[in-house]
Amino acid sequence: MSGKKSPNGSRSDQEGTTEARRMPMREFSRSLPMSLLRAREAVMRQFRPSLRNHGLTEQQWRILRALTAVDTIEVTELARVAFLLGPSLSRILRDLEARDLIERRTAKADLRRGEVSITSKGLKLIEAVAPTSEAIYAEITHRFGAGKLAELQDMLGELERSLAAMEVAGEGEAAADE
Amino acid sequence: MSGKKSPNGSRSDQEGTTEARRMPMREFSRSLPMSLLRAREAVMRQFRPSLRNHGLTEQQWRILRALTAVDTIEVTELARVAFLLGPSLSRILRDLEARDLIERRTAKADLRRGEVSITSKGLKLIEAVAPTSEAIYAEITHRFGAGKLAELQDMLGELERSLAAMEVAGEGEAAADE
DNA sequence: GAAATTTGTTTAACATGTTAAGTTATCCGA
DNA sequence: TCGGATAACTTAACATGTTAAACAAATTTC
C-alpha cells in the first residue's frame, strides 16, 4: 500500500499517451462520491446555459423555484428546502432582494425570524425560464428513460436514508480540552 | 402555472407548522439535480470530518488520491481525472506545493505543460487518511448493500452516457455581435 | 425576573466553482 | 519564417461551500 504502481520507467515515450497516463486510477474514478458528482454535473451542464441567459445561477433558481410554491417561508425553512447552508442563503437573499426578485420582512411574533416571499417580478422571471427548463428535463427523461429515472431516484432516496443514521466519526483528533 | 398555491390566508397560526409550511414543494425537492445533490452530500458528510482532521479538503484529497496511482501526470490530465476545473486545480496545486505534498516541473518536450507528482510527505499523508476512509466506505457499502451500490453506480454511469451527446441549448439569447 | 442558555440569522474568513481574459509556448499554413 | 491560430496553464473576478464567530431576540433556569 506504500508504493507507486504503473512501472513507467522514466516515461521514455512522448506521443503515445502511455497506458498508465491514459487511464489512471480507474478505481478512484469509480468511487461513489465521484460517480454522484459526475452524474450531477452531466445533468446541470444541460441547465446552466439557459439559467445563465436569464441572469440566474443554479442556487438562485432553486430559491426562486422554492418560493413559487409558498406564500411566504422562513429563512431556515427555505434553507432546508433549497438545500443551502445558512451563510450561502443569507448572501443570495441579499442579492435577490436588491434585484427586487424577492421581499423580506421580519415576523411579528418572533423578531429573529425573517419571512421571505417572491415578488411579481420574480414570478415573471420564473415563468420566462420555466418552459426551457421543463423542456430540458423532459429531454433528459426521454433519453434516460422515465422508468429508469424513477428507479434511480428511488435508489438515491434509499441511499440518503441509509446514511442518515450513520455516525460521523472524526477520529477524535481534536485537542483534549474540547 | 402563474399563481401561488397553498391558500394560507394570512398565516393565523403560530405554533402549528402549517401544512403548507411543513411540506412545501414536494415536486421540486424530487427533481433529479436535487436528488443527486442530496445523495452526494449524505455521502460526503461521512468523509469530511476525517479529511478535515488531517487538514485536507475534499478536492485536495481527490488530487492526492489521483497522484498516488501514477508516477507523474500532466495538469490537464489531472484535472480530468480529479474532475476539477482548470482554475480550481491551479490554485490547489499552488497550495499543495507550498505544503510540500506535491512537486511540479515543466516538461522538457513542451514547456507549456506541467508535470505533477506526489511527494513522500504526500504519500505519508495519504497513508494516514486511507484506513479511516476505507472503513467509512466499507460501512456505507454495508449499510446500503454492495449489490445495490453496484447497481446504483451502473445507473449513474448510464445517465452520464445518456446526456453526453445531448445538445446544450442556450436559447440563443446573447447579443447579436457575438 | 435577571442571568444563562438556546435559537434564528448574519458576518467573517478561507476554499472551491465558474466564466472570461491573460500569458507563454507550440503548431501550421501562406 | 513569419504571423495567425491553438494549446496549456494561470489570473482575475464574482458566486457559492464550509466552518467559526458574532449578534440579537427568545426561552429557560434559578
Image: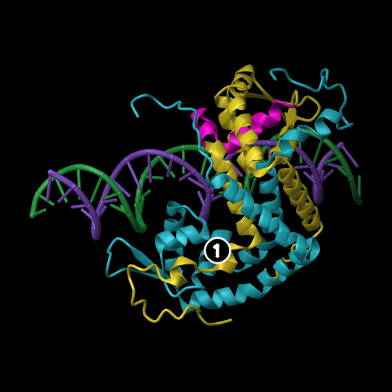
Chain colours: A yellow, B cyan, C purple, D green
**Can residue B100 be seen in this snapshot?**
no
Q: Where's the C terminus of chain B, which quadrant? A: top left
Residue drawn where x is 61% and y is 36% of the image: A139
Residue drawn where x is 81% and y is 34% of the image: B23
- Vertical relation: D16 (above or below) D25: below
Name the one closer to the observer, A103 or B115. B115
Find residue A59 and report its horizontal and vertical position in percent. 60, 37
Q: Main secondary structure of the magenta part?
A: helix
Name the one closer to the observer, A50 or B57. A50
Occupied quadrant, residue A167? bottom right
Name the one closer to the observer, A163 or A135. A135
Magenta stretch contains residue B102: no
Magenta stretch contains residue A55: yes
Q: Which residue is mark 1?
A: B62
In this picture, which residue range is highlighted in magenta?
Answer: A49-69
Residue drawn where x is 36% and y is 24% of the image: B176
Occupied quadrant, residue A77? top right
Q: Chain of mark 1?
A: B
Q: Tell me: C5 left or right of D8.
A: right
What is the three-letter code of the residue carrying label 1?
Answer: Arg
